[in-house]
Every structure is written in C-alpha cells, then in structure tokens.
Amino acid sequence: MKHILFALFLIALPISANAQLRIDMTKGVVEPLPIAITQFKSNGGNTNFARDIPGVISVNLESSGLFKPVNPGAFVQSVDSIATDGPNFGEWRASNAQALVTGTVSPAADGRTRVEFFLWDVLSEKKILGMAYTTTPQNWRRIAHIISDEIYKRLTGEEGYFDSRIVYVAESGPFNRRAKRLAIMDQDGANHKYLTDGNSLVLTPRFSPTEQKITYMSYESGKPTVYLYDISTGRHEPLGRFPGMTFAPRFSPDGKKVIMSMAQNGNTDIYEMSLSSRKPVRITNSASIDTSPSYSPDGSQIVFESDRGGTQQLYTMNKSGGNVQRITFGKGRYANPVWSPRGDLIAFTRMYQGKFYIGVIRPDGKGERLITNAYHVEGPTWSPNGRVLSYFKERPSGNSRSAKIYTVDITGYNERWLKTPVDGSDPAWSPLN
Amino acid sequence: MSINLSNIRDNPAATQSAKPPPPVLTDISMKNAFIASGILHVVIFIVAIFGVPFLPKNDPLIITPVSIELVDISDITQTDRVAPPKKEDKPKEIEKPEPPKPIESAPKVTSETPPVPEDIKKPEEKKPEKVEEEPPKPEPIVEAKKEEPKPKPKPKEKPKPKEKPKPKPKEDAFDSLLKNLAPDAEEARPEEKTIDDVVEDTSSGQIAKLSDQLSISELDAFKYQLEPCWNIPAGAKFAEDLAVEVKVSMARDGTVKNASVLDKGRYNRDSTFRAAADSALRALRNPRCSPLKLPPEKYDQWKSILINFDPRNML
C-alpha cells in the first residue's frame, strides 16, 4: 500500500508542475483602433491620387467610429522608405499605430490607373492584406471606397459599407411651399445628384437590393402613388394604377417584388406585388391600419406597424400573412420598422411623451434600445452591413424647419451629420455597389 | 587583611568569619557527608521530576487542537466559476448565427467602368505583383507556428456547482454597454461584483504549493493591466458569442513570447471571430500593456497562460 501511495505521489509531481494558469478576461474597452494611413507612393500619372485616395480611406474609416487615423504629423517613416525597406514596425509602434496602410499608384499601359495597397498589423509585424485594382482614373473615389471596405472587413470581420450610396429627399423652400425631390450621393456625401425636378412631392424612397432602381411614393399623378425609378436610365413609372392610394413601398430581398400599403374604402392593408406580373397580392386583411412593411433578409418574414391592438405597435408575420406576433409593448407609438440586412435587429421610430426616438429591437421583441432622440427624428435606414443607421432629424428653424440627415453606429455612439447641399429627409441606403 | 570594624559591630556573622578555621574532619565524618549529599541529590532529582505530591498542581494550559485544512483557493474558485446556465439566456439560442457569407468583395459592374479588383478572393495568399518586387523582409515570428504540438489544454471540467441564486440576470446581454435612451428603461445598474467575480479567474486545479501560486490580487493586477489594451468587439453581430481563448507563452520579463488562438478552425472560417481574436492578440502585444507585471519568483506558474477573452459581460 505504501508503495502504491508513493508511486501516485511521484506521478502527481510532474502534473502539478505542468498545470496551466487560466485567466478569464471579462473587461476591456471600446475605443477606435489607431491606424496609420500613409500617402501612397506615386509612380507617375496623376500624382494627386497618391494623396487623395488615402485621404478618402482615412475619412471613411474615421467616420465609422471604429478607427482613429493617426495624425500624419506623427509619421516617422517616409513613403519612399516604406516602399524600399518595408515598414519599420518599431517606429510605427512608437507612434501608437496598431495598423498601417501603405500603397502605390501607378499608370497602367492602357491609360488606366493601378492602385495597390497593403494592410499591416503593426503589433504582430505582419502583412495581413494586400490587393491591387486597375480602373479608369475618374473612378479613383470608388477605388478608395473599395479599399476602405476591405480594410474594414479585415479588421472588424464584417462587410464594409463605404462603397455604397444614399438616396434621399432633398428639401428646399419655405415650409408651406416646400419643394421635395429625389437626390442621390455616395455614402460620404460626394457625387451628389438630383434625380427628380421637384415639381411633385416625393416621399419614402427605397433602394432595390439587386438593381439600380428606386421605389418611392409621389404625388405626381395627383394622389399618392408608388413609383419605380431606374437610376441608370433616369426613367420612372408608376408601379400600377389602383383605385386607392399606395404608399410605404419597399423591395423584397431578391428585388423581384415590392411590398407596400394600399388604402381602399377607408381601410389600409399590406400588399405584395411582383415587378414582372404587376399584380398585387393582399397580405393582411384587417379593419385596422397596417402599413410600413419590411422583409426580413431571408424574405421569410415581414415586420409592419398596425393599430389593430388599439395603439400603433410593431408586428411580425410570415411572408404570406400568417402567424402575426406583436413585438412591441412599450408606451407611446411605434412606426417605420426596418429589418436589418444582417437580420439581428429591427430599427423603428417611437413616439413617446412628445418626443421622437430611433430605436432597435430584436425580432423576438426583446432587447429594445432607443439610441437617439429629437424634436422630430424619423425614417431609419440600415447601412448594407447592418452596422450603421441613417435617419433624419427635423428642428424648428424660425418660421420653417430644418431637416438634416444623420448616421449613428448601432451601439448608439458616433452620431454624425451627413452634409447635404440642401435640407435632407427620408434617407435610404443602397446595397454595396 | 584589614577588617572593617564598623562591620564587625553591626554584623556579628562577619566577626565570626574572621575567626580561625575549624579543625580538620576525620575520615568517618567525610564518608557520612558524602552519603548525605548523595541522598539529598537523589531527593532533589525526584522532586524535580515528579513534583511534590501534596502541593496543589498547576494544571498545564490545555490547548484544544484546531484542525486546519489547507485548501487550494483555486479549487474553490473553480467551483464557483461554472455558473449554472441562466434560464433567461436560453431563449437567445433561438437566434442561430448565420453561416458566414462567402466572401464576395468584387465590385459589381456598373455603367461607370468599375475598377477591376485583381486579388479579391484570397487576400492573404495572393499578392499584387508589387509584393514580389519588394525586397524580401524577414518574416516576423508567427506565434502560432512556434507552438509546440501539445495537446490542447482543456480547462478542467468543473464539478457542477449547486444552483445558487444569482443577481438579477440581464434581460438582454446586448444591453449594458450600448446606449439606451429609453425613458422607461431601468436605471443603469451599478456594477455588481460578487465573490464569484473576485475569485472566478484564479487558476484551474493546480496542486502546486500555495506559496507558489499567483494570489488573487496578483491575478487582478494582471487583468487590470491588460484591460485598457483589449478592445472588445462591441456592436458586432452576436458579439456575446465571441469569446476567444488564447494560449500565451510568457518570457520571464513579463513580455509575451508567443500567443496563439486555440480555435484555429473558427479563426479561419469566421471572419468576425478572427477579428475578435486579432483584437485579443493585439491586447497582448500592445506596448501600453507590456511587460505584464507578474511576480518573477512565480514564473513557473505563469510562463504558460490560457487567457479567455470573453466580452459577454461587457455587452
């Protein structure tokens, strides 16, 4: 017996020596990642690209709130030195950079421009991304957005959203004679362009998820009617001729159908219409007002607002209209639900005690959070990656009102004003270009 | 010899000591003295050993033995660390993460002569030609490669603790770090630190000497130092499921020699997890948090650490 115990003791000794310490880190910080974005090395051609492309990348990444570009004044290594010797990681660490972006711009033989970029992990001293693009010189901004998306994706793990556009309602003129027309711009406000002339009131534009098309509501025909606008041709047409009003349109995830509200005989219900057959199919059939439908990303469910329970609340249902579930029970009224492209949240507008809020809630009705509020804030729309919300805020301004478009991270932080040439409302984010 | 006369008057014994010595003893008287002396010594020894029976005994102070059980604190903390699954958390499992989408970053063709990406699918393997043109750089040490092919150190499966009342579980794990302006939302909860929080992070079932193990305060200091360098993936989809286990080899000076993510399979297939894992690795290599302050005399205990970066409680 003694021998056995002694043997066990001897066996236990090395085990104790090799036991591994385990530590649970449960606290950290949420702060933007310091990233150094150098000028690109120019190998000829338009030398401005070597400065402007990294400039756009820097603005993009900073606007997300997840990155903090290092002040170029703290850069310690020249562009030429990086190109010939590679990054001196010790020096970049000293400037507090944790990631480094470098690149070159060269003229291609066919007159196009070739842009290469590299993403370096400064702390592990590794190159973690390297890509090249060739394009026509006028597409340089697009290249910058695409590179921004790649960097964003590599460092956050989620798709980017910089190579996307926003369509919105541009407003001008006095409050009682407000001109509203459709306008489109890059997500950073560049390349702004008006789509309609402002002769008729337009509202609630929505991007097709698959094509360069927009659906919106217009008073062009004298009564609210849903229209379809082709961005590439500039043509627009009503989605159909109906006895009642049609409004609050939104595309299905496959882009083949539009779901909208139709008011007939004093009752408003939700209809779905195939863009090929143009025949509406009734989805809801209740005596209440059912409106603002939005598909889940997989197309299997629809969220909408309804007053069927006595107050204006949000409901989900199957795409065919069955299994209706109420998901909001808070005080006040809920409206404008929009399902996130990544499926995990539904954004909405809530009105409570004389204030407007933009909030998010999980599709099962849990986890409601209100992330911004204002005198009047409305019309949430999701960035293509489901990480950022855009909406508009309206404030009294003398005898009129001013409407501005904002973006905010879904954490509720990093709210930013998206500058537009005139007042803006009803933003709608496009998918990635 | 001079005699102090005053002493003689005041102390007669002193005067006697000044008398001539007594007569010399005979042999018989010497023998008796030896015997008496011997008996006296024996008596003294007996008394010294056994005491005097008739004198009251001084009972010795009775000290009740206190049984002390040396318990490895890590065992206790191990037990507490495994909290029973919260009932409220279960519904969350309804939402299963979508499988990662195939990478499709190629820009779509538009009427505007789109750029042509040349290296989209494999950003890390394929490089633009320019890469080859660059002088070869000494490849940095890739920690994962240097890992010894040890069997994956699995955290010791802890015995199921008894169900115990928890502080009010969060209604939504996505709630606390994120902004919420809800007028009817409950007040922000103060940070509740339970004994579980304090002790849960100690080492797993080690049987090394207590004096060799890292104390709770040493572990807390370690975490406190690392916290500002760990950027958690707030806002990421299903961020509560992005716990990352990292095996870390430490140098004696407190710097990180090697750090590798244990779940390499998920690292390679799940871009969100990869980003979370990279963030954890950056925390370990961040100069702001290096070298890590750990007691050098206990190096054997922390030369290899398994760190679990778990953002769940921050969300």
Image (spheres, rainbow, N blue to C red):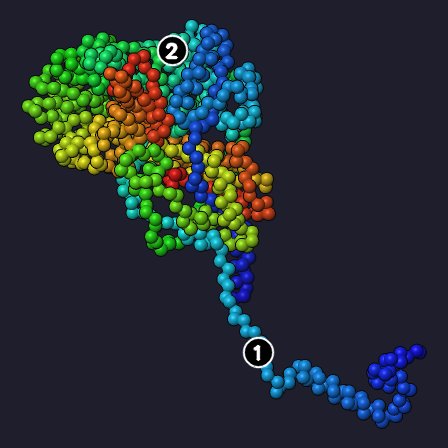
Q: Estimate the x, y position of residue A285 in percent, counting from the top left.
A: 10, 30
Label number found at residue B59: 1
Report the chain holding disc 2: A
Q: Quadrant of the C terminus of chain B?
A: top left
- Depth check, front residue: A123 or B164: B164
Residue projecting furthest to the left = A265
Location of residue B262 by image quarter: top left
Q: Give me the residue at 37% from left, 49% from top.
A: B83
Can residue A88 be spotted in the picture?
yes
- Graded by Cα atoms within 10 Å as few (under 14), some (14 to 19) or many (20 or more), the crowding at tag 1 reads few
CA distance for labels 2 and 1: 103 Å
Q: SS at mark 2?
A: helix
Can residue A345 be spotted in the picture?
no
Of circles 2 and 1, the one toward us is 1
Q: SS at mark 1?
A: loop
Q: Estimate the x, y position of residue B107 in percent, counting from the top left.
A: 35, 17
Q: Estimate the x, y position of residue A358 in percent, counting from the top left.
A: 27, 28
- Depth check, front residue: B211 or B242: B211
Q: Give me the residue at 66% from left, 81% from top.
A: B49
Q: What residue type is disc 1 on?
A: Asp
Q: What residue type is disc 2 on?
A: Asn
Report the chain holding disc 1: B
Q: Is residue A186 left or right of residue B278?
A: left
Above/below status of A339 relative to B35: above
- Depth check, front residue: B302 or A412: A412
Q: Which residue is mark 2?
A: A139
Q: Is residue A362 left or right of residue B119?
A: left
Q: Quadrant of the N terminus of chain B?
A: bottom right
Q: Is residue B194 left or right of residue B258?
A: left
Q: Give me the residue at 37% from left, 14% from top.
A: A142
Above/below status of A250 relative to A193: below
Location of residue B186 by image quarter: top left
